[in-house]
Image (spheres, rainbow, N blue to C red):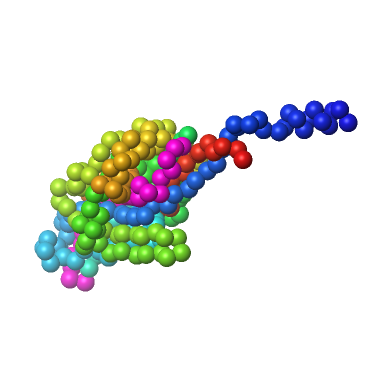
């Protein structure tokens, strides 16, 4: 009887103890930004840079329900008018979270990348080379011309914005880089420590309505298009932000 009483007393939490809980936040906007590069194959008839139709987007280039696409896809295509082209696409993924969904205090924040569709013929260990912070003050202007898909069940908005630029991606939205550790969980699934970055968002909490959306930009592993041979790596991801929180034990 004494042994049982002692064990019970040891297991009972002391007053003022805390328990670790987890909160998962889904992005309010998930966007794939694509840079297209087209180059005629030398020695073959080409109808001209403006008459040659661009290849149709593959289904993998149009993620739905909060997915983003990261990586690059080379290829070639022939058309009925005699046009034959090399083409390549580099994809950047953007996820944005509303500041009102963030907890006021937390122990750690982890960006979780769950791989869905994988196309890999390269030696890159991951489809992204760097991750940067970004913030949006006026989301209506940013996504005005994009195609939006809303999933009412999950509350996610997917924005597929396929932009073409001969001089590469627009880097004006890239802010401080993510420097936290990257945990490789195999099969291109990753957990990325973004605690320091998200802590900086909370420092500006009184002014959160001025920048209602904050998030991350994934820079693909290879953006030196189109001359990257026949090697490609692209992965579509579902992305969430996980918080570990210490709550008072009731």
Quarter occupied by the C terminus:
top right
Q: Residue furthest front?
A: 15
Please, is residue 20 above or below residue 89 in the view?
above
Which residue is depicted at the point 34% across and 55% down? 29
Residue 121 counted in the magenta span: no
Left or right of 110, for residue 5? right
Which residue is depicted at the point 39% across and 41% down? 126
Which residue is depicted at the point 41% across and 35% down? 195
Residue 113 at what x, y percent from top left?
44, 46
How many numbered dots are placed on residues in this image? 0
Left or right of 134, for residue 97? right
Where on the picture, by quarter, is residue 66? bottom left
Where on the picture, by quarter, is residue 171? top left
Q: Residue furthest right?
A: 1
Left or right of 19, for residue 172? left
Which residue is depicted at the point 19% across and 43% down? 172
Is residue 127 or residue 122 the one in the foreground? 127
Residue 120 at what x, y percent from top left?
40, 49
Residue 209 appears anywhere in the view = yes
Residue 58 appears anywhere in the view = no
Residue 103 at what x, y percent from top left?
43, 43
Residue 93 counted in the magenta span: yes
Q: Residue furthest bottom?
A: 80
Residue 222 at what x, y percent from top left?
29, 43
Please, is residue 158 above or below residue 2 in the view?
below
Write down the region rendered in magenta: 80-106
Quarter occupied by the N terminus:
top right
Is residue 224 or residue 16 the one in the foreground? 16
């Amino acid at each position: 009887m004494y042994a049982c009483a002692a064990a019970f007393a040891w297991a009972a939490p002391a007053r003022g103890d805390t328990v670790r809980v987890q909160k998962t936040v889904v992005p309010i906007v998930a966007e794939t930004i694509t840079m297209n590069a087209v180059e005629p194959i030398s020695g073959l008839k080409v109808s001209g840079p403006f008459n040659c139709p661009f290849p149709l987007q593959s289904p993998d280039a149009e993620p739905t329900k909060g997915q983003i696409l990261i990586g690059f896809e080379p290829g070639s295509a022939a058309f009925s008018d005699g046009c034959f082209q090399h083409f390549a696409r580099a994809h950047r993924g953007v996820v944005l979270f509303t500041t009102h969904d963030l907890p006021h205090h937390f122990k750690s924040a982890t960006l979780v990348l769950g791989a869905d569709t994988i196309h890999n013929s390269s030696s890159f260990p991951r489809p992204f080379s760097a991750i940067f912070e970004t913030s949006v003050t006026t989301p209506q202007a940013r996504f005005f011309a994009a195609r939006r898909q809303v999933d009412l069940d999950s509350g996610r908005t997917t924005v597929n914005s396929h932009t073409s630029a001969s001089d590469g991606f627009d880097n004006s939205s890239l802010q401080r880089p993510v420097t936290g550790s990257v945990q490789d969980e195999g099969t291109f699934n990753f957990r990325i420590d973004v605690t320091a970055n998200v802590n900086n968002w909370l420092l500006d909490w009184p002014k959160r309505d001025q920048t209602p959306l904050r998030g991350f930009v994934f820079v693909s592993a290879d953006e030196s298009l189109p001359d990257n041979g026949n090697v490609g790596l692209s992965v579509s991801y579902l992305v969430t932000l996980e918080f570990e929180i210490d709550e008072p034990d009731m």
